[in-house]
Image (spheres, helix red, strand yellow):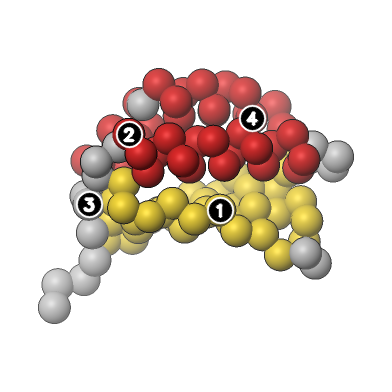
């Protein structure tokens, strides 16, 4: 298992434009990428310009595939100008 968390800080006034694009990307990832197991889009009303993603992939290779998927590349190109900051953190499952 390979876990990815992403924290976006969206530029002021753009979250309502960003979120539909983010939801479409999440849905496409879950429906077209066999290695994408979970793709949650989260926010907190107290921090409306901060969007948090929690993604689980079968493997690091499945995540690399996600990064080259046409829907992701389109999403990334559309939202890049809207993002003030983006932090990506990855985790691999610890052997039991």
> What is the C-alpha distance between the residues marked 4 and 3?
26 Å
Q: Earlier in the sequence, mark 1 or mark 4?
A: 1
> What is the C-alpha distance between the residues marked 3 and 1?
19 Å
Quadrant where the N terminus is found in the figure? bottom left
Query: Which element type, helix, strand or loop, lies under badge 2?
Result: helix
Q: Residue at x 78, y 56 (%)?
A: 48
**Mark 4 sits on what residue?**
79
Question: In the image, residue 76 lies at what x, y percent?
Answer: 54, 28
Q: Earlier in the sequence, mark 3 or mark 2?
A: 2
Q: Indicate whether 80 appears above or below 38.
A: above
Q: Residue at x 24, y 44 (%)?
A: 35
Q: Earlier in the sequence, mark 1 or mark 2?
A: 2
Q: Residue at x 50, y 36 (%)?
A: 25
**Mark 2 sits on what residue?**
32
Left or right? Give the position of 66 relative to 81: left
Residue at the limit of the structure toward the left, as seen here: 96
> What is the C-alpha distance between the residues marked 1 and 4?
15 Å
Looking at the rendered image, the disc whose residue lies closer to the viewer, 4 or 2, is 2
> What is the C-alpha distance between the residues marked 4 and 2?
20 Å
Question: In the image, residue 87 lies at what x, y percent?
Answer: 55, 50
Q: Which of 72 and 86 lies nearest the eye of the viewer?
A: 72
Query: Which element type, helix, strand or loop, lies under badge 4?
Result: helix
**Mark 1 sits on what residue?**
41
- Residue neighbourhood size for the residue with mark 4, other residues' Cα within 10 Å, grouped as few (<14), some (14–19), many (≥20): some
**Mark 3 sits on what residue?**
58
Q: Which of 95 and 41 lies nearest the eye of the viewer?
A: 41
Left or right? Give the position of 85 relative to 28: right
């Amino acid at each position: 298992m390979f876990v990815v968390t992403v924290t976006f800080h969206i530029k002021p006034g753009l979250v309502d434009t960003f979120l539909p694009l983010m939801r479409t990307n999440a849905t496409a990832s879950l429906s077209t990428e066999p290695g994408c197991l979970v793709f949650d889009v989260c926010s907190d009303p107290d921090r409306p310009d901060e969007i948090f993603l929690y993604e689980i992939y079968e493997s690091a290779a499945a995540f690399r595939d996600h990064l080259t998927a046409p829907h992701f590349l389109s999403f990334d190109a559309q939202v890049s100008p809207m993002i003030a900051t983006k932090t990506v953190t990855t985790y691999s499952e610890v052997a039991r």
